[in-house]
Image: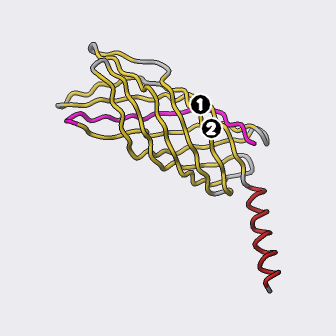
């Protein structure tokens, strides 16, 4: 009996290992940072270049670590705003639609640093998103997604950072 249980457990482990895959990702995020205070709202285009390291444990669940670096700053009303960097950790539930297409969600936490002409601010917040990926072959996958990186109020200023992300992942 013990041998049968061990064999079944080993078989499950091998099946999971066959599905499991790791990846490195590179993407460009078209983030928008919105600052609102006293009924006045100003939007800034704050794109980032993102790097990801992820692991898909099975066809339905993965995890991902991301680092984003500011690609450009935007100015309005004499105020300069740029995402300096961010670090995020996500759980990634996935729904395969076919052998090559998948829908997924992102749920995690991000620590974001925003540089402005009146000072820098960094803070952590819940981050979430959803997207789809398309495998080009067994080594390359393309993805498009929406991400809410940050949404918080601090000292009477509401800050929201969200946008769309396009990228490529190299599977290994």
Q: Residue 65 or 149: which is nearer the viewer? A: 65
Which residue corresponds to the image point at 42% horizontal and 18% vertical from the top-left? 73
Between residue 26 and residue 145, name the one nearer to us. Answer: 26
- Please, what is the dominant secondary structure of the magenta stretch? strand
Q: Which residue is mark 1?
A: 27
Contact between labelled residues 1 and 2, with CB atoms less than 8 Å apart: yes
Distance from the alpha carbon under mark 2 to that under mark 1: 9 Å
The location of residue 85, given as percent across then percent down, is 46, 29
Residue beneath disc 2 = 143
Residue 118: quarter of image: top left
Question: Relative to 100, does residue 45 appear above or below in the rendering?
Answer: above
Numbered range of the magenta stretch: 155-172
Q: Residue 138's image quarter?
A: top right
Q: Position of residue 119 (x, y in %)?
A: 30, 22
- Element type at mark 2: strand
Expressed as whole percent of the image width and height from the top left, the position of residue 97 reads 67, 52
Q: Residue at x 56, y 28 (%)?
A: 28
Residue 160 painted magenta: yes
Provide residue 16's location: percent of width, then percent of height.
Answer: 73, 61
108 left or right of 33 in image = right
In this view, the mark in front (2 or 1): 1
Which of the marked residues, 2 or 1, is nearer the chain's N terminus?
1
Residue shown at 79%/63% (left/top)? Answer: 14
């Amino acid at each position: 009996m013990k041998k049968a249980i061990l064999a079944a457990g080993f078989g499950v482990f091998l099946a999971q290992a066959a599905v499991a895959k790791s990846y490195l990702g590179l993407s460009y995020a078209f983030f928008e940072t919105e600052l609102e205070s006293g009924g006045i709202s100003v939007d800034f285009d704050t794109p980032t270049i993102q790097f990801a390291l992820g692991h898909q444990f099975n066809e339905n669940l993965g995890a991902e670590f991301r680092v984003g670096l500011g690609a450009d700053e935007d100015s309005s009303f004499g105020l300069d705003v740029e995402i300096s960097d961010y670090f995020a950790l996500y759980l990634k539930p996935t729904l395969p639609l076919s052998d090559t297409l998948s829908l997924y969600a992102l749920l995690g936490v991000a620590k974001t640093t925003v540089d402005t002409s009146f000072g820098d601010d960094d803070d952590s917040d819940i981050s979430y998103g959803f997207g789809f990926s398309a495998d080009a072959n067994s080594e390359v996958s393309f993805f498009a997604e929406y991400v809410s990186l940050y949404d918080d109020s601090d000292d009477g200023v509401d800050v929201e950072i969200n946008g769309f992300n396009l990228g490529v992942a190299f599977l290994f």
